[in-house]
Image: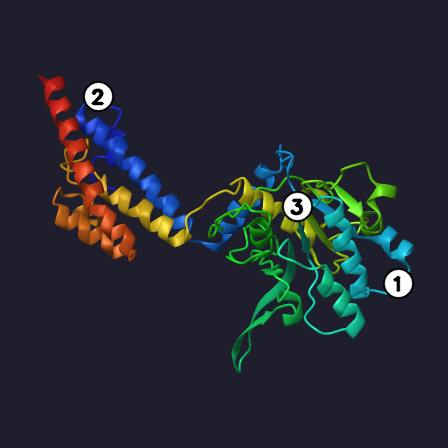
Amino acid sequence: MFAGGPWWKGLGASAPGTPSRRNGILAIAVLAVLLVAGLSLLTPWKLVEARAFDYLSTISPPPPPDDGPVIVAIDEPSLAEIGLQWPWPRDLHGRLVEALRRAGAKAVGLDIIFAEPSTPAADEALVKSLGPDVVLAGDETFIETEQAAQHVRVEPLAIFTATGAATGIASIAPDGDGILRRVPGYGDGFAAELLNAAGRPATVPRNALLQAFGPSRTYPTVSYYQALDPDSFLPENFFRGRIVMVGLSLQNAPTLSQGGADVHASPFTIRTGRLVSGVEIQATVFDNLAHQLFIARPRDGRQFSRSCLARALAFLPSGSRPDGRPWPALWLPCWRSSPAAIWRCATAVSSSRRWRQRLPLLLSQARRRRAIWRRSGSLDAA
């Protein structure tokens, strides 16, 4: 505050289009950018942003792509029909893989971890059914204690991968509030490896948001026992040319309070209160990768905020305020037109080497724009 009233009151007194009015409006815009950039670093802001994404992305979601995966669910009807205690013998999974291959499935992903031996006969039956068109699930966990930090990776037995079957990491990392919003960043993730097996390799993005397609049971789903005998229970050519994912997917989707095995909260959980099975999450990741439907975002929120701040500093006006008095001393190191001064201000708030490489070009563009504005103001005054 200065004598004579706040400086911004002079904005309305300036004639439209004059340099002083443009500079004043630009200064307000810069302050707004700086405020938003600062708020974006705060944890409450990040939570608000995440919840806003949940609500906005689930208002009118797109349907799953027509060529998306079909889910074979290990569900209540299958548990009742098969009549065996879980985990089921591995020769049964071998029968399923062979039945799906005969039915024309392009690739099969088993979202089941076979990390320990069972009976020799059952393991051998599963080995005979596997091949390059099959992906087996793996797991990757980071365990941190006061004594040590461990990176644990669990993979299928070597006898299974020796058949040419690939290993895909099926681990899922939710955000801090327990909701899964991001594409898992594993280059050898379960969905990515299944795309490779189907002859459709895709690049896994980093820090991208998932495009969800609906709540639990949005994807076409059949019971495990039906897939064992598709000629008897399913329409003709139901699996032909399709990608098939096999995993636990209960029809009675558990709620947040109930929890359960291999179920996760998604943006739709905010609306429905129900969790989504892990195999459906993998199907969503598959379609996001296959059709590039994920929502790219800055690799680091802090880097994005630094970029906004550096851009704002580069466009700060020079000269005096609209009322003729100098700008507050806070901006003196930054608003002078010297590129070196702006460089010092920008690098003070941005330690990103990539941004420092791009900043000189931005400063050059800013100086050209200001020169055009000044010439335009001189012509208006004349």
> How far, Cα to Cα, is label 2 from label 3?
64 Å
Dot in front, 2 or 1: 1
Residue 70 image position (x, y, % from top left): 71, 44
Q: Is residue 188 visible?
A: yes
From the viewer's side, name the closer residue of 245 and 123: 123
In the picture of the structure, the residue carrying the numbered disc 2 is 17
In the picture of the structure, the residue carrying the numbered disc 3 is 106
Residue 44 image position (x, y, % from top left): 50, 52
In the picture of the structure, the residue carrying the numbered disc 1 is 84
From the viewer's side, name the closer residue of 51 and 133: 133
Work out which quarter of the rendered image holds the C terminus and state it: top left
Give the amino acid type for the residue marked by disc 1 in the picture. Answer: Leu
- Residue contact between numbered discs 2 and 3, judged by CB atoms under 8 Å: no
- Residue contact between numbered discs 2 and 1, judged by CB atoms under 8 Å: no
Give the amino acid type for the residue marked by disc 2 in the picture. Answer: Gly
Q: Earlier in the sequence, mark 2 or mark 1?
A: 2
> How far, Cα to Cα, is label 2 from label 1?
80 Å
Dot in front, 2 or 3: 3
Looking at the picture, does residue 131 appear above or below residue 124?
Answer: above
Give the amino acid type for the residue marked by disc 3 in the picture. Answer: Lys
Work out which quarter of the rendered image holds the N terminus and state it: top left
- SS state under label 1: loop
From the viewer's side, name the closer residue of 58 and 22: 58
> How far, Cα to Cα, is label 1 from label 3?
29 Å
Query: What residue do we see at 54% from left, 47% from top?
Result: 50
- In the rendered image, which quarter is residue 323 located in? top left
- In this rendering, position of residue 235 left or right of residue 2: right
Q: Earlier in the sequence, mark 2 or mark 3?
A: 2
Query: What residue do we see at 21% from left, 21% from top?
Result: 17
Mark 1 Cα within 10 Å, few/some/many (few <14, many 20+)?
A: few
Dot in front, 1 or 3: 3
